[in-house]
Image (tube, rainbow, N blue to C red):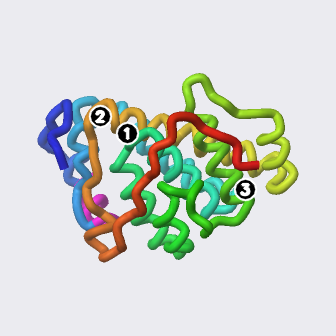
């Protein structure tokens, strides 16, 4: 991992002790990102709190949401989020062959048409300007229903919120997947523009 653009602060005090203990219990280590965000604890706590709320949503399939977040991370270049969500896919008992292939989902034959549509939606939402089409949303609503598409959309928006912040601050992978023996993620094939897979 390279140096972050803002060096991690020392995590101190009672609150810091609790956060470090919780992180070590859940992840085996304290993520670099916590030290970076420790410079502004209200921001850290708000982001963490919202992330915990996102984890409780249940109208959309967990595998679809994870693949969508990973597709955003791959496109934006957030190695931290890509590694963490790959690690979490194992903890959630998701399809690890598919999870490993997310960075090259367009070329891989591992995914169902719905999974491909979800990752296309994640990438389209992550473009500047977004390239989401009426047809793409209508297809997802037909397959998943309105509530699940709203949740998927919010999950992708949250993924953009976290991935772009990490990239801007130079926060890279902490090696969670490698630490638990997962095969390296497939390499993303560079794409100049997002083309429809429908």
Residue 181 occupies which quadrant of the picture?
Answer: bottom left
Q: Is residue 151 above or below residue 30?
A: above
Dot placed on the residue nearer the N-terminal end, 2 or 3 = 2
Q: What residue is pinned by disc 1? A: 45
Most foreground residue, 22 or 110? 110
Q: What residue is pinned by disc 3? A: 59
Q: How many marks?
A: 3
Q: What residue is pinned by disc 2? A: 41
Query: In x, y percent, where is residue 105?
Result: 56, 57
Most foreground residue, 119 or 173? 119
Q: Is residue 79 visible?
A: yes
Q: Is residue 135 above or below residue 56?
A: above
Q: Residues within 10 Å of mark 2 (few under 14, many from 20)?
A: some
Circle 1 sits in a helix, a strand or a loop, which is it? helix
Q: Is residue 18 visible?
A: no
Give me the residue at 52% from left, 59% from top.
Answer: 102
């Amino acid at each position: 991992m390279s140096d972050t653009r803002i060096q991690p602060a020392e995590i101190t005090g009672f609150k810091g002790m609790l956060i470090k203990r919780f992180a070590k219990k859940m992840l085996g280590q304290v993520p670099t990102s916590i030290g970076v965000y420790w410079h502004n604890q209200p921001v850290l706590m708000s982001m963490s709190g919202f992330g915990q709320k996102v984890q409780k949503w249940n109208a959309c399939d967990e595998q679809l949401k994870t693949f969508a977040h990973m597709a955003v991370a791959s496109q934006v270049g957030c190695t931290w989020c890509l590694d963490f969500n790959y690690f979490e896919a194992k903890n959630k008992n998701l399809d690890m062959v598919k999870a490993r292939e997310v960075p090259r989902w367009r070329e891989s034959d591992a995914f169902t048409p719905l999974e491909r549509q979800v990752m296309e939606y994640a990438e389209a939402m992550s473009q500047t300007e977004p390239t989401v089409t009426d047809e793409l949303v209508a297809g997802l609503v037909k397959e998943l229903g309105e509530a699940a598409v709203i949740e998927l959309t919010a999950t992708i928006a949250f993924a953009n919120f976290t991935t772009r912040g990490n990239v801007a601050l130079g926060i890279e992978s902490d090696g969670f997947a490698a630490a638990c023996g997962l095969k390296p993620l497939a390499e993303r094939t560079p794409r100049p523009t997002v083309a429809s897979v429908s």
